[in-house]
Image: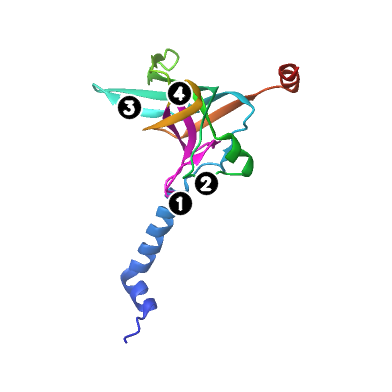
Amino acid sequence: MKKWNWKKILNWGGLGTLALGAAWVARKRRRGNGEKPVPVPDSAQRIEIVTEERKNVLEGKTYHSRAHYRLEPTRFRVWSFLRQPEDDESAHKGQRIYHVTPEVRVFPIDDPENPSIVREERYYATLHLYTEGRRDPIPSHLARGHLVEFKKCHVGGSVNGVETGEKVISLAPVARFEVGEESPQEKASQQH
């Protein structure tokens, strides 16, 4: 059996450097340039997500747009026997379903102080961090610099929700997010 001389092949005409550089760039893209994902606490009472600006051209005019998502937790949850839970506690609780209010703010490049707000239809969905290179998105996590994914759900009748199979993936990475949690006083007042 013939043995390959990899050094000779990789050094031939600089192709080795080119191949290694392309592999490094592809690996960086898969990882994303974002921060490390953080879990969304189960005690979250609201979540605000704002994406980075996107440049759009419409009829020769340049616009910028930015998506805003407001998430309000519901009493509904999705249980899945196929997905492996992140920890033992979430295995018993299922994945939380949020009421998502999306809106897009569009503003001309020459007048950024007066955005037009385009409100989209509200929906119920589970929250996921979309990461390229992974087969499944990371449930109940957020990170700046990564796309966010919502898996739409049907709810009602009981505390169980069912995923519809429809997904909404943000067009731009998350620029910032804020998770509002219940204060200890609110928790104590609910228990009495």
User: Is tag 2's residue or tag 4's residue first in the polypeptide sequence?
Assistant: 2
Where is mark 1, residue-wise?
28
Residues drawn in magenta: 125-153
Where is mark 4, residue-wise?
155
Looking at the rendered structure, the kind of residue marked 3 is Asn
Residue 161 pos. (x, y %): 47, 28
Q: Which mark is residue 84?
A: 2
Quick check: is 141 in the magenta stretch?
yes
Is residue 124 depicted above or below 16 in this figure?
Answer: above
Label 1 vs label 3, nearer the camera: 1
Residue shown at 39% from the left, 29% from the top? 54
| Distance of label 2 from label 4 (alpha carbons) | 22 Å
Looking at the rendered structure, the kind of residue marked 4 is Val
Residue 52 pos. (x, y %): 46, 30
Residue 157 pos. (x, y %): 47, 20
Residue found farthest to the bottom: 1
| Distance of label 1 from label 2 (alpha carbons) | 26 Å
Label 2 vs label 3, nearer the camera: 2
Secondary structure found at label 1: helix
Residue shown at 76% from the left, 20% from the top? 188
Label 1 packing within 10 angstroms: few (<14), some (14-19), many (20+): few
